[in-house]
Every structure is written in C-alpha cells, then in structure tokens.
Amino acid sequence: MLLTAAATCAVLVAVLALRDASGPSGDAERCRPTALLEPPCGAWFGAFVPHDKANLEEKVHAYEKRAGRTLDIVYTYHDMSAVTGRRLEGQLLTEQEQRVGKDRMLLLSWESKWWGGTRDQQPTWRQIADGDLDASVIDAQARRVREYGERTGRKVFLSFDLEMDTRTPQNGTPEEYVRAYRHIHDRFRALGVDNVVWTWVITGYLDHADLFRRMYPGDGYVDWIGYNQYNYYRCHSAPWLSFAQTQRATHDWVRGHLSRDKPLMLSEFGTADDPERPGRQADWYARVPGVLREMDGVKAALQWNHRDPGPHCDLSVAGERAWAGLRGAVADPYLHQPRP
C-alpha cells in the first residue's frame, strides 16, 4: 500500500515517539546515559527556543511540533542579579524551566551580568572570585539547584559565562575568570550541590586559541566542553560554510590542545538562509547527522533558532522547506538516545 507524504511523516513521528519513550530496542542498558549525562551510543539534540520567561513551555512545545520530536536539551539564559523572588532573569530553574525539565534536560547559561542594571551593578570576575556575591546571589542559586535535584532526582547542565573569551578585559583578566569559575564550582560543592554537570562554553574562534588555554578552568572543574560556531553567510560578511566547515577545525583544536576525552557539545549551531537558493538551508541541516558521527566525542548538538545582531543575521529556520530538512536530520537514530 502506498502512503501519502503526510501519512509517511505521521508514521515516522509515531515510531520516533516510541523510541523517545523506550530507547533503542535491546540496547537500553548499553546506551544508558552516564552519571555526567553523556549518551554512549549517539548524541543529544537540543535547542535554544526564543521565549519570554513566562512562556518557555509553550514555545518549546511549538518548536517540538515543527521539529517532529521532543528535545533532549532545552537551553536557557540567566543573569546574576540578586535574587529578590520576582525577577525571573536572576532565578536559576524558574517554574517554567522545572516543568519543561520533567521530560527534558536543561542547560542553564549563567552570565556575570545584570541585564538592565546600572554600571555599578555589573559583577566582575574578581568580585565573584573573592566571594562578594556569595550571600546575595551564588548561595541562593546553589540551594535552588540542590533542592531541584533533591525533589526530582534530576541533574542540570550549568555553564558560567559562555563565550568568556569575548568578555575580557571588560569583566576582568583570564586568570580572574578561572578563579571566578572555580569559586562558583567549589561554593556549589560546599553547599552540597551534586546535581550539576559543569559545562564550559567558548566561541570556538581559533584566533582566540591563546585565550581558550588561559581561561580553561582545568579538567577537575569541567565535565563537558562546548563551543558555538555558525554558518553566518552574509551576516558579518561571512562566506557560505557547510556544517562540517563550521565545526571540524574547532573540534580538532579542542581535542589536540584542551582535552582528548571530555564529551563535547555544539552548544549553539545553526545557519543563515540563502534567499537566492531556497533549498540551501534545508540541505545544510540534512548533513548534520553524518558529520556528527565523524567527530570524536561530540555528544550533544543544540540548534540556536534565533538571530544575531546586524543585517542578514537571522539564523532561525527559514520556512517549511528548511524545517523539513531539520526534521529529517533530527529524526536520525543517532540523535535518539535513551534519556535519563
């Protein structure tokens, strides 16, 4: 019996939903995630989905409907404003995040900023390293994360100051960043937080290689290494690059100079559109699974479905043809692993 394209798609989605629920048949034990949330048999798929703090759940569900699957990881961002009970930007694990986290993992990006705050409210790495924010910010957030783990049994990925290689010297020196990162890590441990997977995220631009070396907190402080590389195309006057071209050079540098065995995360990846070639974005996404299989230790890939500042910088999925390319890519069995 011949199926229509719509019927075929519906069958595929149903099959993948069963995989999401039960994991690969016969391989559930072998492919069970490690204590550091590493999937032994493939890679996680996740995304940053644009949202307001009050509608994360709604926006995630809408994205998943278009992608044809449940996200493994949802990526959110927070600042370091003092916890006042109402300002959601300064709360790790909002109620919305906790609801989303029932069926997915969370990557919380924690920035040493106070969005909208005055100049004198912007924390520096030296202040963080010296413990000046412990009482007002860090201890309260650590307890929130600990209580989430105690209540749910779930872990979270936590990144402190993603792309820190672009934040010096305004936030401090590379050495002060390392001290600040280690202080937060050690403070969480001292407060009994054992449900954090420590994720260190750089831009991946290799002209920052010396900064990467200087700002790496050390193997004892980092569980995963992430980097953010895009096919910007006309955005920032960049040429068109394939998915492999955006990822492999940084991957190889990290493996050769920072760590040969830490799990790697493409913590933000995506592509601009090419209005003169409507199928180009779809084809770019279609090649993602094959490249992931070839890159040693890449265990998560998170699509950044938003825009960058500047002209021609919309990096979101552009239209139904591109969504079809992404759906096909993220339906690949390599990106369907048993979740914790």
Image (tube, rainbow, N blue to C red):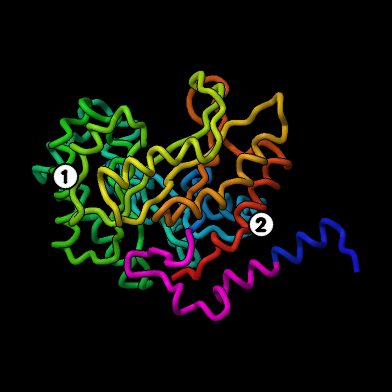
Numbered mark located on residue 170 in the image: none
Residue 223, position as x, y percentages in the image: 28, 57
Disc nearest the viewer among 2 and 1: 2
Determine if the magenta segment contains residue 25.
yes
- Taking 80 as reference, is 330 left or right? right
Q: Residue at x 56, y 27 (%)?
A: 240
What is the span of residues highlighted in magenta in the rendered image? 14-43
* Residue 252 image position (x, y, % from top left): 36, 43
Left or right? Give the position of 257 relative to 11: left
Q: Which mark is residue 133?
A: 1
Q: Residue at x 58, y 60 (%)?
A: 70
Q: Report the quarter where the C terminus lies.
A: bottom left
The mark that comes first in sequence, 2 or 1, is: 2
Q: Nearer the viewer, residue 80 or 87?
A: 80
| Residue receiving disc 2 | 68
Name the magenta segment's main secondary structure. Answer: loop
